[in-house]
Amino acid sequence: MTSEGARVLLVEDEPALAETVRYNLEREGFVVALAIDGRRALEMFREMPPALVVLDLMLPEISGLDVCRLIRAESTVPIIIVTAKDSEADKVTGLELGADDYVTKPFSVRELISRVRANIRRSGMFDETPGRLAGGEIEMDVERHETRVRGELVAFPPKEFELLEILLRRKGRLLTRNFLIEEIWGADYIGDTKTLDVHIKRIRSKTEAEPHDPKHLLTVRGLGYRFVD
């Protein structure tokens, strides 16, 4: 699997620059979500977690530095910050807050796209072959619909299997309840979020050595779930 098709959250309040970057990223095969202020950026990040964030530091509502800090508190998603040429202090602060990379205005769109690809690749999100996934003590063969836990073959009904597959494909990233429900049950689902929680509980019972004290499939209180190795 390549990084093309990956979702990128672009946070930029300059309309002309935002449209130029979005156009070029989409032309390269990325799916781009655009936020024009810090508050909306956080909402969009939590509604549908991206593979990478391109984050301008000069934003209305909530500053880019605060957005960077809040995203990093919830997720290991790669963050590329965009800084003005004379804002060395902000660049350093952004990196200290957990940003992975930076570009300085004015920048080459081609260079930005190269950095987007490199950071997604380093994140490991697209390292797995499409048919085989692994995480913690789990090995999954998607094509055969087989899952092994600590070497033993374990049966998962279709919804549990799909849910576990999404969690493994996005290891380390916070996946919100809304995102998971939409992915598994569809955008028109009108049931209770407890359905998702029940499926998570069942997956834990089959994959965790101590389901009541999970080490891999973790709850992020009030937001969703994250799978960690």
Image: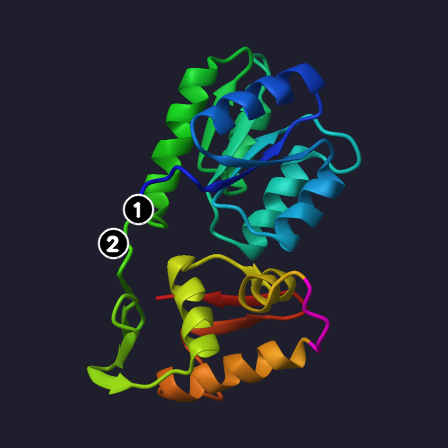
Give yes or no for residue 190 being in the magenta stretch.
yes
**Residue under label 1:** 1
Q: Which mark is residue 129?
A: 2
Which of the two residues, 65 or 168, is positioned nearer the viewer here?
Answer: 168
Specify few, some or many for label 1: CA neighbours under 10 Å numbering under 14, 14-19, or 20 or more.
few
- Main secondary structure type of the part rendered in magenta: loop
Residue furthest to the left in view is 151
Measured as percent of width and height from the top left, residue 138 is found at 29, 74
Which of the two residues, 103 or 124, is positioned nearer the viewer here?
Answer: 124
Measured as percent of width and height from the top left, residue 65 is found at 64, 36
Mark 2 or 1, nearer chain start = 1
Q: In screen coordinates, is 207 left or right of 46?
A: left
Report the residue at 30% width, 46% height from top: 1
Report the residue at 71% width, 25% height from top: 13
Q: Is residue 213 visible?
A: no
Q: Amino acid at mark 2?
A: Thr
Magenta stretch? 188-192
Measured as percent of width and height from the top left, residue 61 is found at 80, 36
Tag 1, which secondary structure? loop
Q: In screen coordinates, is 182 left or right of 132?
A: right
Tag 2 and tag 1, C-beta contact below 8 Å:
yes
Q: Is residue 77 above or below residue 53?
A: below
Report the residue at 47% width, 17% height from top: 109
Give yes or no for residue 213 being in the magenta stretch.
no
